[in-house]
Amino acid sequence: MTHASANSALLTGTINAKGHETTFYFQYGPTVAYGSRTASAKAGSGTTPVKVGQLASPFFTGYHYRLIATNSVGTKRGRDRTYTKKSTKLKFELFKPAAPPVIGTAVTISGVLTGLNNAHQRITLQASPFPFHELSDLGLETVTNTSGRFTFHVGVLTRTTRFRVVAVDMLLPVVSKIFTEQIAVRVSLHVRPSGRRGFVRLYGTVTPAEVGAPVLFQLQRPARPGRTKKTENREFRWVTQTTTVVKHATRSLSRFSSIVKIHRAGLYKAVVVVLKGPLVSGVSRTLPLHASPPRGRRRGH
């Protein structure tokens, strides 16, 4: 997708880094030979699709463009696209995070106002925290840049919140769709010996307290060949090995602990499942764990 304004454009696309640190840039120009490119930028190392964008200038109707992504696995080139001028009607597009921010981390909300006269427009942010009543102004205002892009630095959110962006200087107000910024519980994961051969103790904390929530201990496995477009490009999947539940610890946090037999070496993580309330499910960092050799096998054989 491309959002053009005057002789520049915001080129956007989607990247799934599949767990590898990835960089990207856009090629663009009047023909399929392109001739120009944007600066390189980082796309992270996540495992879900992430929307990315770069400003291209000069850029005009009829220009060709494509997205290029590179990581340790190799380089992938997106298909060629051609920009054709679209409606001049003003419209908000918001960039959503690849994963819910963890409680206690600062939140930013960014997007682009597309259409005629989208530059230098004064906009404001409205919000309604869980359990979601009427949206009200946060007192945060900003101005779109020359390509219509904007960012609000919201700060730390303590609960899932609904937002809406409004262009305030229009005769007919331009309003974005309501979108929900989910906030995840914070999950820690640690390991220590259990005293039993082939077993370890996996334990951690959940902040704030989520007593009774299920905990899934998952192992990263190679993905099977996908049968649908949704799964065919995945390189790995997470498989639940065992479960436990979150137990009481203090007023501000809860704990979980389980003795687990490690059948396979690999990366493990803990997923705390939150089904309702002001926060959503959280995921710990990954831990590399090693499986014990079978009984009777001697080193060197």
Image (cartoon, helix red, strand yellow):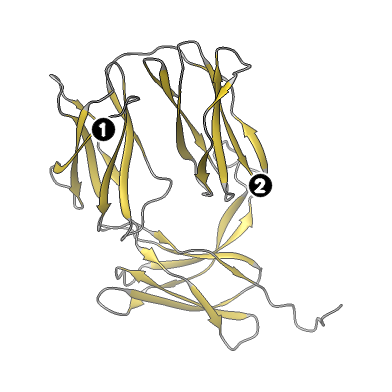
Vertical comparison of 230 with 28: above or below: below
**On screen, 277 above or below 96?**
below
Q: Position of residue 178 (x, y in %)?
A: 25, 37
Residue corresponding to mark 1: 177
Q: Is residue 301 left or right of residue 143?
A: right
Q: Nearer the viewer, residue 282 or 42?
A: 42
- Could you say which is closer to the camera, residue 56 or residue 162? 56
Residue at position x 63%, y 50% from top? 223
Q: Position of residue 122 (x, y in %)?
A: 20, 29
Query: Viewer-proximal residue, 224 or 39?
Result: 39
The residue depicted at 34 percent of the width and 71 percent of the height is 212
Q: What residue lies at 41% left-to-right and 50% top-to-bottom?
A: 99
The N terminus lies in quadrant: top left
Q: Residues within 10 Å of mark 2 (few under 14, many from 20)?
A: few
Q: Is residue 211 left or right of residue 20?
A: left
Residue at 45% over, 11% down:
61
**Residue ranking furthest to the right:** 301
Numbered circles on residues, count: 2
Q: Which residue is mark 2?
A: 72
Q: Quadrant of residue 124?
A: top left
Q: Residue 197 location, x and y as percent?
A: 65, 85
Q: Is residue 19 above or below residue 294?
A: above
Amino acid under label 1?
A: Lys
Q: Position of residue 191 (x, y in %)?
A: 53, 77
Q: Earlier in the sequence, mark 2 or mark 1?
A: 2
Which amino acid does the dot numbered 2 rest on? Answer: Ser
